[in-house]
Amino acid sequence: MISTRIFSLAAALALTAALAVPAYAAEGGGNGMPREFNARMRVCAACHGENGVPRAPTIPIIAGQREDYVLKQIHDFDTGARKVEVMEWMAKAMTAEEKTAASALFAKRNWPAKVTQVAAAAAPRGVAVCQSCHQQNFMGAAQAEGMSTPRLAGQNYEYLVEEMRRFADGERANNADMVQIMKGLSAADRDAMAKYLAGL
Ligand code: HEC
Ligand code: HEC
């Protein structure tokens, strides 16, 4: 009698454990990554947006951004080649595998539809130079050296204009070409370009 009861208790526990496996996988997002990873991705989404729309216009859209570009940025935040405190903490907490998986995850998502409609601006002068690397339609493109340029079309204006200033002032120096190019533009030129790009 007692042994039967112990047996059924053990069976019940085994059953619970067996049932917990699919529940765990579901909680893990069904993407084969451990729960810790998916919890971390929810942290990213808290700022970068659950549906791709960032919480604030100073935070970049990364849903639908080019995968190798995203991975390079996470790497640069980690090494300090690109200095942004909050992103440095985020990157340092990630394993190499998580960095790769996160980049693939965000790249696969859809770039969000515009929330605030930015009035389409006329193409400012000098934009052809940018197109030689960022592509005609500013969707970003793989470069001869292999690394992609980022998509700029439809990126947040506030984010774009601030990044362009940082390149110009040498605060963001993880790409020498961009530092050179932005140093050659006035603040007014950068502003016009950011408005144009955000409106695409
Ligand atoms: C507390 C808010 C916050 C959280 C959480 C956060 N980010 Fe960010 N992220 C930012 C901000 C702000 C920037 C822009 C930094 C700057 O000013 O240059 C950024 C920039 C980035 C960029 C660079 C995009 C570009 O266009 O260059 C990537 C990639 C990125 N974050 C990925 C992630 C990932 C992956 C996570 C989760 C592990 C994450 N972020 C969590 C706020 C956040
Ligand atoms: C020689 C190629 C080249 C040219 C020309 C160029 N870019 Fe870039 N740009 C890049 C690369 C590469 C990156 C990514 C740098 C990195 O790894 O962080 C970049 C990054 C950027 C970023 C940061 C995007 C983000 O998500 O953080 C902005 C904004 C930008 N470029 C705007 C421009 C504008 C505007 C022009 C024209 C005035 C221009 N670029 C011309 C190669 C170029």
Image: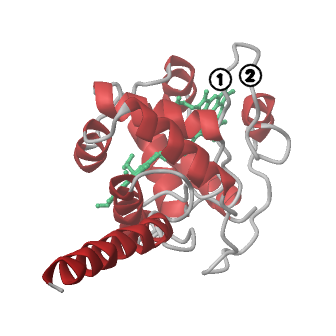
Marker disc for residue 147: 1
Residue nearest the viewer, comparing 53 with 105: 105
* Quarter occupied by residue 76: top left
Residue nearest the viewer, comparing 104 with 32: 32
Q: How is the image coloured?
A: secondary structure
Residue nearest the viewer, comparing 157 with 83: 83
Looking at the picture, which amino acid does disc 2 mark? Gln
- Residue sitting at x 48%, y 25%: 179
The residues tagged by marks 1 and 2 sit, at their Cα atoms, a distance apart of 6 Å
Relative side of 113 to 191, left or right? right
Where's the C terminus, which quadrant?
bottom right
User: Mark 2 CB in 8 Å range of ligand 2?
Assistant: yes
Contact, mark 1 vs mark 2 (Cβ under 8 Å): yes
Looking at the picture, which amino acid does disc 1 mark? Met
- Residue sitting at x 76%, y 15%: 144
**Residue 58 in view here:** no
Q: Secondary structure at mark 2?
A: loop
- Residue sitting at x 39%, y 59%: 44
Where's the N terminus, which quadrant?
bottom left
User: On screen, 40 above or below 176?
Assistant: below
Number of numbered tags placed on the structure image: 2
- Residue sitting at x 76%, y 34%: 141
| Residue found farthest to the top | 145
User: Mark 1 CB in 8 Å range of ligand 2?
Assistant: yes
Marker disc for residue 71: none
User: On screen, 59 above or below 142?
Assistant: below
Relative side of 169 to 127, left or right? left
Where residue 64 appears, as percent x and y from the top left, is: 66, 55
Where residue 83 appears, as percent x and y from the top left, is: 29, 35
For mark 2, does the 10 Å Cα neighbourhood hold few (<14), some (14 to 19), or many (20 or more) residues? few
Q: Which residue is mark 2?
A: 143
